[in-house]
Image (cartoon, grey):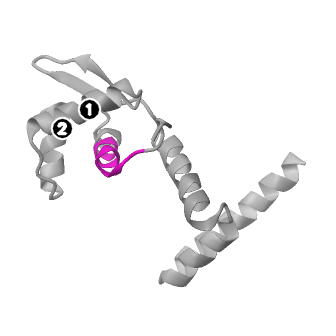
Amino acid sequence: MSNKSQLASLQLAIMRILWQKEAATVSEVRDTLAAEGRELAYTTVATMLAKMERKGQVGHRAGAKAFVYFPALPQEQVSRTMVNDLAERLFGGDITLMVSHLLDGCELSVDELARLKALIRKKEQEDRHAR
């Protein structure tokens, strides 16, 4: 994955922790992963954070006793990139097909459907104003 906004499963789990906490040590990341059912060695988490830093996905600063890592990428950017990649790889870039697949495969409440309709109306208005 050459794009720094594309994250593998463990990288995404680590980023979610950093987005939530805003910053964390290797131990804090490891403990949170363990609480989520992902038992990993301290060195595994440290190595992954170092690799992610080299890729520009996270940064660090020196803490009192250990490095404190923080996200270098905004969550919105990563989400958008990964969703676009998913749409391209699974649906050939056909967003309508992707949304149709999601709607067919999920039970949506009336409130969720109303939110989706509102998002579509908002996007239509933005597109009209952009022209």
Which quadrant of the figure contains the N terminus?
Answer: top left
In front here: 111 or 41?
41
Quarter of the image for residue 95 reads bottom right
Q: Give the magenta range.
A: 7-16
- Residue 130 sits above or below residue 28 on the image: below
Query: Is residue 24 shown in magenta?
Result: no
Query: Is residue 11 shown in magenta?
Result: yes
In contact (CB < 8 Å): disc 2 and disc 1: yes
Measure the C-alpha gap from mark 2 to mark 1.
6 Å
Instruction: Determine whether the residue tagged by mark 1 lies in a helix, strand or loop.
Output: helix
Q: Visible in this render: residue 53?
A: yes
Instruction: Indicate the amino acid at tag 1.
Output: Leu
Q: Residue at x 87, y 55 (%)?
A: 128
Q: Which residue is mark 1?
A: 49
Instruction: Indicate the amino acid at tag 2.
Output: Val
Q: Which residue is mark 2?
A: 45
